[in-house]
């Protein structure tokens, strides 16, 4: 069975938490745009995307490229937070798994011959 791209995937096939997160992101982007009193036409022009793509972003559409979301965030002055999404400090599970892999004890090897210095 081949891989299915998000463009081919029906939105209802995506996990519910993914759909919710993108809808929230889209809504937050829309609210940020409105707070800044930027029209859809001006935002689309600044981001070099169509108004249709901007509309899809603001609805949290799965088929829109992450790069388009990033450019819109940049235009809103919010790009810094995008780089921190998967930051190690924001990954308590990953940090916990790393800690579990730490050795319980460390043994030092002794040299059988003294080193010449």
Image: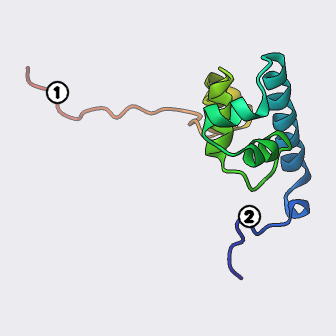
Residue 40 visible, this orientation: yes
Task: Assess disc 2: are there few (<14), some (14-19) or many (≥20) residues with their C-alpha within 10 Å of its C-alpha.
Answer: few
Q: Quadrant of the C terminus?
A: top left
Q: Determine which quarter of the picture holds residue 45.
A: top right
Q: Nearer the viewer, mark 1 or mark 2?
A: 2
| Position of residue 16 in the picture relative to residue 100 (left or right) | right
Marks 2 and 1: in contact by CB < 8 Å? no
Q: Quadrant of the N terminus?
A: bottom right
115 w.r.t. 9: above or below: above
- Label placed on residue 114: 1
Task: Out of 36 and 105, give the one closest to the viewer.
Answer: 36
Task: Out of 52 and 62, give the one closest to the viewer.
Answer: 52
Task: Assess disc 1: are there few (<14), some (14-19) or many (≥20) residues with their C-alpha within 10 Å of its C-alpha.
Answer: few
Q: Residue at x 67, y 22 (%)?
A: 78
Q: Position of residue 24 (x, y in %)?
A: 87, 36
Task: Out of 8 and 54, give the one closest to the viewer.
Answer: 54
Q: Earlier in the sequence, mark 1 or mark 2?
A: 2
C-alpha span from label 1 to label 2: 67 Å
| Position of residue 19 in the picture relative to residue 106 (left or right) | right
Which residue extends farthest bottom? Answer: 1
Q: Determine which quarter of the picture holds residue 75.
A: top right
Which residue extends farthest front? Answer: 41
Q: Position of residue 54 (x, y in %)?
A: 75, 41
Q: Residue at x 34, y 35 (%)?
A: 109
Residue under numbered circle 2: 7
Which residue extends farthest left? Answer: 117
How has the structure been colored for display?
rainbow
Q: Residue at x 69, y 23 (%)?
A: 76
38 w.r.t. 48: above or below: above
């Amino acid at each position: 069975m081949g891989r299915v791209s998000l463009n081919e995937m029906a939105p209802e096939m995506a996990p519910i938490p993914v759909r919710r997160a993108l809808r929230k992101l889209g809504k937050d982007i829309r609210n940020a745009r409105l707070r800044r009193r930027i029209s859809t036409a001006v935002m689309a022009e600044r981001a070099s995307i169509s108004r249709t793509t901007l509309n899809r972003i603001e609805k949290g559409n799965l088929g829109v490229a992450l790069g388009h979301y990033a450019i819109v965030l940049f235009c809103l002055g919010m790009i810094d937070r995008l780089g921190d999404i998967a930051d190690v400090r924001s990954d308590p599970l990953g940090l916990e798994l790393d800690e579990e892999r730490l050795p319980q004890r460390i043994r030092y090897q002794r040299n059988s011959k003294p080193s010449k210095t």
